[in-house]
């Protein structure tokens, strides 16, 4: 099907080629890159951002696209989490990078600009997985990494010979990547502009994860010396590594941590929990500045983990591993997902008890979301359990499929229940006091107190999320108080 798109490129270029060549003949070539936001998070004219600055760090994907843009283009970035788009703007070209939940908004933006004759180029996870869908709304799609294809796309656009599909080699070297254009963002709008990526992909094959599908099971990393040079040039103390699994290549991670040690930075990232069972690796991470890790625990059921091919996680080691991270001074944010095949209504109170007892400082608690492009999506679609393909609801807040051992309403309300209880004032206070006892005020203030309060405020103040009735199902808002009798009424965090 994708080859067919290129066969019609001649007809397409007859329509836009003349306009493109006319725009390219102008001395000033302007590229507008847009980060889309869902309705509940989008900044509207005259309003302040909904999402706290403590949860905002730079959108590295668009900064990398800007870095790969030829120097004769003038580039600007609009982040809808921070400011509204001026749809009356008339750039030479618009670039959109988006995930599944952002697709409807991206297509709306594309329609607005294309109606004025402005070409729109798309890339990112959703266009890579569903390029034919994206091409119904955009002029061209980049499949995979942007850096190898982006200059060619702009060159072809200038020549009036833009193709419909550009595909990057998933095994291409990451050596010599152009530096992200951090200068294009206002530092006052973000916790830090210092987002850095050392690797792409993951060798694990968890069936619910988009990463493996996007990178076609390939795992690559940048040369350590290039990463260290980039970090050395950054001002500010905090670094956010956006790698999907920073420690999956142990040898590489040790080399990176050795180089980081002398830079005197504090960094946060994602890693698998196995780092806690490797004393040398954990010590090297902490000595290099590690202050917090996101770890995907996903489930307290080994059977669930087995069925989604996340076999390297051992539930019986969760408590011990988290305790080791805490003793090393590392703040833990856990990824918790509800709705796996073995999950029944009792899973919510049991998981909440675990989160409190393990003293986990932060948690991303979501219903299982089968993103298109993943084996999980294909499986649930084959089984006829998808409830909607309205991509707005694939935002990690809404139930979009029929679970095996509970109703969709039970999955939605149970997830909301755990979120609200975990981020209740009493629960936050207990976590903060526990952290103060073994970390002190400085290392408790931001990663524990401020982030928890920001998360609580986000839950309480977000606008009502989209809701609809389809086949008798209500999508419930995680920001709405849910009265659900999971567990004892006198639960530890109520």
Image (cartoon, helix red, strand yellow):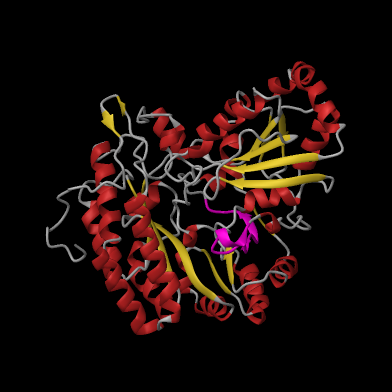
Q: Position of residue 235 (x, y in %)?
A: 67, 71
Q: Quadrant of the C terminus?
A: bottom left
Q: Is residue 25 left or right of residue 364?
A: right
From this view, report whether residue 443 is shown above or below residue 57: below
Q: Which residues are magenta?
A: 186-204
Residue 302 colored magenta?
no
Residue sitting nearer the eye, 294 or 77: 77
Q: Is residue 249 left or right of residue 402?
A: right
Looking at the image, which residue is at 25% across and 51% down?
Answer: 417
Which picture quadrant has residue 16?
A: top right
Residue 406 visible to the viewer = no
Looking at the image, which residue is at 39% across and 61% down?
Answer: 454
Looking at the image, which residue is at 61% across and 34% down?
Answer: 87
Residue sitting nearer the eye, 221 or 277: 221
Residue 187 colored magenta?
yes
Q: Of all residues shown, which one is farthest toward the left?
A: 489
From this view, report whether residue 207 is shown above or below residue 166: below
- How many labels sit on residues? 0
Residue 350 visible to the viewer = yes
Which picture quadrant has residue 311?
A: bottom left
Q: Position of residue 358 (x, y in %)?
A: 31, 70
Q: Position of residue 20 (x, y in %)?
A: 80, 27
Q: Is residue 142 left or right of residue 287?
A: right
Q: Quadrant of the N terminus?
A: top right
Residue sitting nearer the eye, 433 or 76: 76
């Amino acid at each position: 099907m994708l080859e067919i798109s290129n066969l019609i490129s001649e007809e397409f270029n007859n329509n836009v080629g003349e306009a493109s060549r006319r725009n390219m003949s102008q001395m000033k070539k302007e590229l507008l890159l847009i980060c889309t936001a869902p309705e509940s998070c989008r900044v509207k004219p005259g309003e302040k951002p909904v999402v706290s600055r403590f949860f905002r760090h730079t959108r590295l994907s668009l900064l990398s696209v800007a870095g790969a843009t030829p120097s004769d283009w003038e580039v600007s970035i609009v982040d809808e989490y921070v400011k509204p788009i001026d749809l009356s703007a008339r750039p030479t070209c618009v670039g959109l990078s988006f995930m599944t939940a952002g697709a409807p908004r991206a297509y709306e933006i594309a329609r607005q600009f294309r109606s004025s004759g402005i070409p729109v180029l798309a890339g990112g996870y959703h266009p890579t997985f569903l390029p034919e869908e994206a091409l119904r709304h955009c002029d061209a799609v980049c499949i995979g990494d942007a850096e190898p294809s982006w200059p060619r796309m702009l060159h072809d656009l200038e020549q009036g010979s833009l193709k419909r599909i550009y595909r990057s080699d998933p095994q291409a070297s990451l050596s010599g990547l152009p530096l992200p254009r951090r200068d294009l963002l206002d530092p006052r709008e973000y916790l830090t502009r210092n987002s850095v990526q050392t690797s792409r992909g993951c060798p694990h094959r968890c069936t619910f994860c988009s990463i493996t599908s996007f990178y076609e099971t390939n795992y690559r990393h940048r040369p350590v010396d290039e990463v260290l040079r980039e970090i050395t040039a950054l001002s500010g103390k905090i670094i956010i590594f956006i790698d999907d699994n920073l420690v999956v290549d142990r040898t590489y991670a040790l080399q990176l941590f050795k180089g980081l040690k002398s830079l005197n930075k504090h960094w946060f990232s994602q890693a698998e929990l196995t780092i806690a069972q490797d004393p040398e690796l954990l010590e090297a991470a902490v000595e290099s500045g590690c202050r917090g890790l996101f770890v995907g625990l996903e489930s307290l059921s080994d059977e669930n983990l087995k069925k989604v091919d996340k076999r390297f996680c051992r539930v019986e080691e969760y408590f011990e591993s988290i305790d080791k991270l805490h003793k090393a001074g590392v703040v833990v944010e856990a990824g918790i997902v509800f709705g796996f095949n073995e999950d029944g209504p009792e899973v919510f109170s049991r998981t909440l008890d675990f989160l409190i007892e393990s003293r986990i400082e932060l948690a991303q608690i979501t219903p299982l979301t089968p993103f298109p492009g993943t084996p999980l999506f294909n499986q649930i679609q084959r089984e006829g359990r998808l409830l909607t393909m309205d991509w707005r609801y694939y935002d990690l807040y809404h139930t979009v499929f029929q679970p095996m051992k509970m109703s969709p309403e039970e999955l939605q309300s149970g997830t909301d229940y755990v979120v609200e209880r975990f981020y209740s004032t009493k629960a936050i206070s207990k976590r903060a006091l526990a952290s103060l006892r073994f970390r002190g005020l400085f290392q408790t203030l931001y990663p524990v107190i401020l982030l928890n309060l920001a998360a609580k405020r986000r839950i309480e103040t977000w606008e009502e999320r989209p809701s609809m009735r389809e086949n008798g199902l209500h999508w419930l808002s995680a920001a709405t108080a849910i009265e659900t009798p999971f567990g004892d009424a006198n639960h530890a965090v109520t």
